[in-house]
């Protein structure tokens, strides 16, 4: 079925919020008028759409990205400051899964060897 049942759509929204909160190690707050997911660094708004027109911009970046580069899309709205441009990036490119404990971390919280994430700061402290 399509995304036209309001009750079902709210349900889908909550499910998406829960899934994202779990992945980022944040907390789903999700009360109307507040942030959806609380996180030490980010304040996260989660949307779940049947389709998203903006995705084609990121897909173009992915098609054109040389191997090993992280594709991101920057959308500029005319007459707006570039500081306010919107950046799209795949979840997996922003939140990195620790190969040792499976929790997700920001890129600067991971330790790398030859560009590959080895362990998170928590696992490193447990060494
Ligand atoms: Zn870890």
Image (cartoon, grey):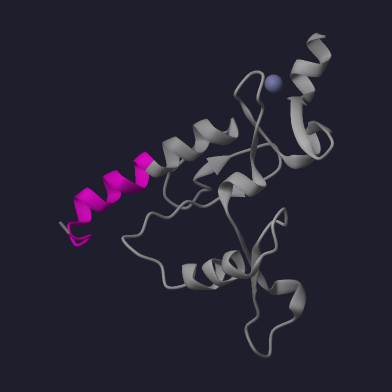
The question of residue 3 being in magenta is answered with: yes
Give the camera-side residue of 56 and 47: 56
Residue 100 at what x, y percent from top left? 67, 19
Count of numbered circles in the view: 0
Please state if 70 lies on the left or on the right of 115 as rendered.
left
Relative to 27, residue 123 above or below: above
Residue at x 61%, y 69% (from the top left corner): 61
Residue occupying the far bottom of the picture: 79
Q: Which residues are magenta?
A: 2-15
- Tell me which corner region of the image, top left, top right, bottom left or bottom right, holds residue 74: bottom right
**Ligand 1 picture quarter:** top right
Residue occupying the far top of the picture: 127
Give the camera-side residue of 36 and 20: 20
Residue at x 21%, y 56% (from the top left corner): 6
Q: Quadrant of the C terminus?
A: top right
Give the camera-side residue of 116 and 27: 116
Residue 119 at what x, y percent from top left? 75, 24
Relative to 43, residue 105 above or below: above
The question of residue 89 being in magenta is answered with: no
Q: Quadrant of the N terminus?
A: bottom left
What secondary structure predominates along the stretch shown in magenta? Answer: helix
Residue 93 at what x, y percent from top left? 64, 48
Residue at x 66%, y 65% (from the top left corner): 65
Give the camera-side residue of 37 and 65: 65
- Tell me which corner region of the image, top left, top right, bottom left or bottom right, holds residue 18: top left
Residue 14 at what x, y percent from top left? 36, 42
Please state if 67 lies on the left or on the right of 114 as rendered.
left
Please state if 120 lies on the left or on the right of 37 as rendered.
right
């Amino acid at each position: 079925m399509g995304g036209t049942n309001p009750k079902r759509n709210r349900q889908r929204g909550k499910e998406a919020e829960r899934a994202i909160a779990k992945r980022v190690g944040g907390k789903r707050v999700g009360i109307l008028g507040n942030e959806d997911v609380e996180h030490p660094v980010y304040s996260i708004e989660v949307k779940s759409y049947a389709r998203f027109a903006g995705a084609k911009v990121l897909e173009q970046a992915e098609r054109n990205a040389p191997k090993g580069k992280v594709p991101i899309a920057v959308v500029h709205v005319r007459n707006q400051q570039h500081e306010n441009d919107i950046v799209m990036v795949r979840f997996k490119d922003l939140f990195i899964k620790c190969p040792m404990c499976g929790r997700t971390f920001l890129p600067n919280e991971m330790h790398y060897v030859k560009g590959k994430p080895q362990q998170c700061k928590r696992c490193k402290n447990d060494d």
